[in-house]
Amino acid sequence: MSTKVMPLELIDKCIGSRLWVIMKNSKELCGTLRGFDDYVNMVLDDVTEYTMVDGVKEKTKLEQILLNGNNIAVLVPGGDPEA
Amino acid sequence: MSELAASKPETTEDNNNDNDSLTPSTFLKTVLGRPVTVHLSSSSRYTGILSCLDGYMNIAMEQTEEYEGGQLKAKYGDVFIRGNNVMYIATEKKIK
């Protein structure tokens, strides 16, 4: 019967583990999910930000961020694309 | 600050606040007065002391430095950033 998994339930299961976030604007972030709200604004720890600059991936490390849910396209549980 | 927190649109209390999760609303309450970096979707960056913010991520900052492409463009005493432009707010030290 209840084998359905609601999208936000899936994200809730990711709290405490690594999460790969792909943004609408060809930016990507990887971090440990600390929490989120109904808009999927998220608090992430130990974040690596990947930005495409002239076809080259640029990395930035961030201690902790509150990410606006507005620009999020895809969430991938498990984490880093290159780890 | 409590009325600010009460006026925000999120209804976060139903998300697992019982465990050690740090929801956006708790984050917002804790970052006040801290040094932060605000990244806008236009890829410009503002660093300064966070003096005030709300659930729309509207932000008031002090001692603000504006960076564009990693280069310091301007310094402001006070700055207001409309929330829709904010991509993320980064703190320099973790909130537990």
Image (spheres, coloured by chain):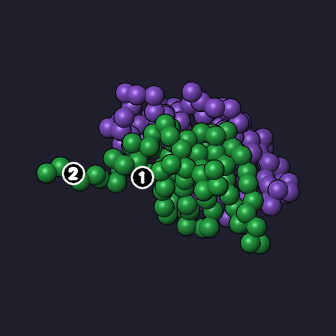
Chain colours: A green, B purple
Name the residue tied to disc 1.
A39
Question: Is the residue marked by circle 2 packed among few (<14), some (14-19), or many (20+) residues within 10 Å?
Answer: few
Q: Quadrant of the C terminus of chain B?
A: top right
Could you tell me the amino acid type at mark 2? Thr
**Which of B92/B62 is in front?**
B92
Question: Is residue A43 in view?
Answer: no
Task: Give the percent coordinates (x, y) of residue B30.
Answer: 56, 31
Q: Is residue B29 left or right of residue B6?
A: right
Question: Tag 1, which chain?
Answer: A
Q: Secondary structure at mark 1?
A: loop
Question: Is the residue marked by circle 1 packed among few (<14), some (14-19), or many (20+) residues within 10 Å?
Answer: some
Q: What number is the disc on residue B38?
A: none
> Residue at image x 18%, y 49%?
A2
Q: How many marks?
A: 2
Question: Is residue A34 in view?
Answer: yes
Could you tell me the amino acid type at mark 1? Tyr
User: Which label's residue is closer to the chain start, 2 or 1?
Assistant: 2
Q: Quadrant of residue B14?
A: top left
Task: Give the percent coordinates (x, y) of residue B67.
Answer: 80, 55
Q: Quadrant of residue B69?
A: bottom right
Q: Are the residues tagged 2 and 1 within 8 Å (C-beta)?
A: no
| Mark whose residue sits in front, 2 or 1 | 2
**Which of A73/B71 is in front?**
A73
**Which of B29/A50 is in front?**
A50
Name the residue tied to disc 2.
A3
In this view, B57 is above or below A15: below
> Residue at image x 60%, y 52%?
A80
Q: Secondary structure at mark 2?
A: loop
* Furthest residue toward front: A83
Task: Give the percent coordinates (x, y) of residue B32.
Answer: 61, 33
> Residue at image x 55%, y 67%?
A24
Q: How far apart are the alpha carbons under marks 2 and 1?
A: 24 Å
